[in-house]
Amino acid sequence: MGTKWMITSGHPLASQAGAAILDRGGNAVDAAIAANAVLNVVRPHMCGIGGDAFIILYVAREKEIKALNASGRSPYKATRDFFVKMGMEKIPDKGILTATVPGAVDGWITALENHGTMSLETLLQRAIEYAEGGFPVYRELSLVIENESSLLERCPDSKRIFLTNGRPPKPGELLVQNDLAESLKKIAEGGKDTFYRGELGRALVKF
């Protein structure tokens, strides 16, 4: 119970990360970014730096409701003719050709620059810790990984991370994501240019 603020999210660790930021004097935008970054780690099937962000906030000092649409557009080369030439009648719903340009990182930083009070490095710290040190897998995530195991096996990196010992993690076992931790560290240090134009962006294009 409280009288000053409240926070909710799709996982207790994410809510706790946001609450910790509010306890330290951060505002709602700071807390939302911290929580969303942790969701990136603990709900990898739902959230991620490869996805989008949609933000609606009330700015009290301006007495205005503002919205931020950080959804990625399709790549410039992903035209109708591109898919037709590849013999496709529709855009596939799985695989690399379904990808849009990720908008989440730009959304985080745009919101932070306009309405936040803390550094990106501070806000991503909990997420980095959970990615690096691991967190206990819960039943839903275990089932999702099990159901998608045939798809995850196609990519060596996905298989290495999510199918340790050749099987889906059981509830209670730790899931460690060192590569994600390193990516978040680079974003915390270098901002969105690192992700869109720098080392991480080049790695995504190469993949």
Image: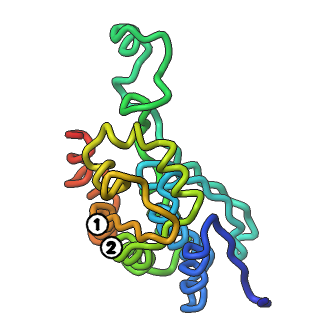
Q: Can residue 114 be seen in this view?
A: no
Give percent across and percent down for residue 146: 48, 48
The secondary element bearing badge 1 is classed as helix
Mark pair 2, 1: CA separation? 5 Å
Figure quadrant of the N terminus = bottom right
Figure quadrant of the C terminus = top left
Disc marking residue 178: 1
Seen at 51% across and 57% down, the residue is 142
Give percent across and percent down for residue 99: 42, 35
Q: Pointer 1: residues within 10 angstroms few (<14), some, or many (20+)?
A: some
Q: Given contact means CB atoms under 8 Å apart, are the residues at marks 2 and 1 in contact?
A: yes
Seen at 21% across and 46% down, the residue is 202
Give percent across and percent down for residue 107: 49, 56
Seen at 38% across and 8% down, the residue is 87
The secondary element bearing badge 2 is classed as helix
Q: Is residue 60 visible?
A: yes
Precedes in sequence: disc 2 or disc 1: 2
Disc marking residue 132: 2
Q: Which of 171 and 97 is in front in this view?
A: 171
Q: Which amino acid does label 1 sit on?
A: Asn
